[in-house]
Amino acid sequence: MRKIGDMSNPGRPQPRSQPRGQARKEHILAVALKIFAENGYRGASIAEIAEGCGLSQPGLLHHFPTKADLLTAVLEYRDRLDAEKFHVDDPTPGTAALRHYVNIVEHNAHLPGLVKLFAIVTSEAAVNPAHPARDWAVGRYEKLIGGLAANLRLGVEDGSIRADVDTTAVARLVFSMMDGLQLQWLLNPDRVDMPGLFRTFIDELTTEITTPDR
Amino acid sequence: MRKIGDMSNPGRPQPRSQPRGQARKEHILAVALKIFAENGYRGASIAEIAEGCGLSQPGLLHHFPTKADLLTAVLEYRDRLDAEKFHVDDPTPGTAALRHYVNIVEHNAHLPGLVKLFAIVTSEAAVNPAHPARDWAVGRYEKLIGGLAANLRLGVEDGSIRADVDTTAVARLVFSMMDGLQLQWLLNPDRVDMPGLFRTFIDELTTEITTPDR
DNA sequence: ATTTACTTACCGAGTACTCGCTCGGTTATT
DNA sequence: AATAACCGAGCGAGTACTCGGTAAGTAAAT
């Protein structure tokens, strides 16, 4: 715990508590994201990231003591930002939850850097059990799938979704489709309409799992 | 062209034409596959592959002059083997083509090494335009999607598949689902029933695109 | 208001190591 | 005699990370 708030001019909005290293840190995270995204973990070098920040190598390592620390900081930072933007923890019962992810995919279509980061890091972690982001990747899927499945279960309870639907299985399919489409889109952004394809998938899925009117 | 066959003992079945370097080469390809699969292109080292073959580094480079050559040789070798095993170019009209891929996914569930190789190399290529396997990845999707779409179009022509189905879009969705499920399965093989999930997806998809009986 | 004590934010130089790849040569096969 | 199949040694570049230091800022004590 540190006491910082009570300085002489409380009126100034000021970056809040963090003196200035915080701004530098966020800058580093932004640069690191881009370089990790295009080269993966092993392919990215601390030197390159440092240079992109106008720092020396030891200068960067002052803020993030190891390369693995830097990667996990980038991932956590992005997760935190995303959790704020899309309030993923709010309950959105039923098929509305599915439509929510259509919006996210549309949003991601304008952020290839982010998509690349998640694609490459997830694959690396999937393929190499010792990868520094392994726990992150496993936990991320758990969180995503658990959250969507919970929302779908709410839909089952209120009767809008058929009772015989395996909500976890559906959630897995949804995120598989998201990730698979991202790969094709990154390889061929002009010919692959990622949001459009995902939307048709979600539309068909929605009509399938919705309780039929009688 | 090389003339080798006419040696003194034509009765022996012998590995066919290639003297012995061919056997060594295939051994190298098998070892390289495993190491590329678990570390990606950049993360894998020629030294490690050579050691796994009982060769020195220059000894390996005698057979494959550069690292990129070795990777593309591995990928082409696998493609050739797969094309022989699953005769992908045979026309299998209609939804039978979809069921064919269910079999392949079931088969892949016993070959995590292969799945890893394709997952990591595809992601690397998707994320980095200068990746040595970029053309391979783009061309592979083109071939897979084109082939499946063509088979689906046959189904449209013979009336078993609805005429308003966008066959290319459906093909893209199928392979997206394959690749996305592979990631989740690699991260969590015990909890993710990859073939089962893919089969339910294909089943639902099949009923959707089939012409309704009237 | 100034000194003292401490922390933060860096950098230059270097360590020990790995990387892909080459050169010059030897051995085995045909 | 010719070619294929190697290997030992080494090159130049890059790797993550460390060491020892400096300069600046901050907080409390005087």
Image (cartoon, coloured by chain):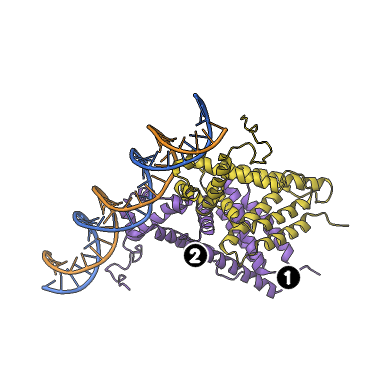
Chain colours: A purple, B yellow, C orange, D blue
Residue type indicated by callout 2: Asp
Residue that label 1 marks: A162
Q: On what subunit does the disc labeled 2 rest?
A: A
**Residue B111 is drawn in which quadrant?**
bottom right
Label 1 residue SS = loop
Give the x, y percent position of residue A2.
Answer: 31, 72
In front of the other: A163 or B84: B84
- Inspect the image, locate mark 1, and give the three-letter code of the amino acid beneath it: Arg
Residue depicted at x 63% and y 47%: A192
Q: Quadrant of the N terminus of chain A?
A: bottom left
Q: Residues within 10 Å of mark 2 (few under 14, many from 20)?
A: some
Of labels 1 and 2, earlier in sequence is: 2
Q: Residue at x 60, y 49 (%)?
A: A184
Comparing B115 with A144, the one in front is B115
Q: Give the residue at mark 2.
A: A135
Q: CA distance from mark 1 to mark 2?
A: 34 Å
Pick the front one: A209 or A20: A209
Residue A214 x/y as whole percent? 81, 70
Q: Name the residue rendered at 56%, 64% in the picture.
A: A141
Q: Is residue B168 above or below residue A85?
A: above
The local crowd at label 1, few if under 14, some if 14 to 19, many if 20 or more residues have their Cα within 10 Å, is some
Count of numbered marks: 2
Front in this rendered view, residue A160 or C16: C16
Query: Given this view, does label 1 or label 2 mark the residue nearer the observer?
Result: 2
